[in-house]
Image (cartoon, rainbow, N blue to C red):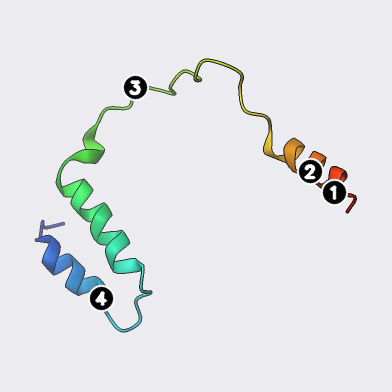
Amino acid sequence: MRERPVREARTALSGPDAAPFRPPMVVTTYSAVAAGFLETPDTGTPAPPPGPLPRPALEVHAKTVAASGA
């Protein structure tokens, strides 16, 4: 794949059938790749933050629904 300026990529993705968010989203990703941002080596899964771990979302939702009487 040949490299091309961001301007060319945006023009190529801005056709009449493109969703309004698509060109900015793809151009942002394209510029991050072109700048080498995604070349950062994978250092594995980060350690969890200190303190209590978040509660499971399903558990929180179920308790909220039960408390509302629904």
Instruction: Report helix, strand or loop for mark 1.
Output: helix
Question: Marks 2 and 1: CB-CB under 8 Å?
Answer: yes
Closer to us: mark 4 or mark 2? 2
Outermost residue, bottom side:
16
Q: Residues within 10 Å of mark 1 (few under 14, many from 20)?
A: few
For mark 3, what is the residue?
Answer: 43
Sequence-earlier tag: 4 or 2: 4
Sequence-earlier tag: 2 or 3: 3
Q: Image quadrant for the C terminus?
A: bottom right
Q: Residues within 10 Å of mark 4 (few under 14, many from 20)?
A: some
For mark 2, what is the residue?
Answer: 64
Instruction: Report helix, strand or loop for mark 4.
Output: loop
Q: Is residue 50 above or below residue 45?
A: above
Mark 4 residue type: Ser
Question: Marks 4 and 2: CB-CB under 8 Å?
Answer: no
Q: Residues within 10 Å of mark 3 (few under 14, many from 20)?
A: few
Sequence-earlier tag: 3 or 1: 3
Nearer-the-camera pick, 54 or 32:
54
Calculate the distance from the C-alpha at mark 3 to the C-alpha at mark 4. Answer: 36 Å
Instruction: Report helix, strand or loop for mark 3.
Output: loop
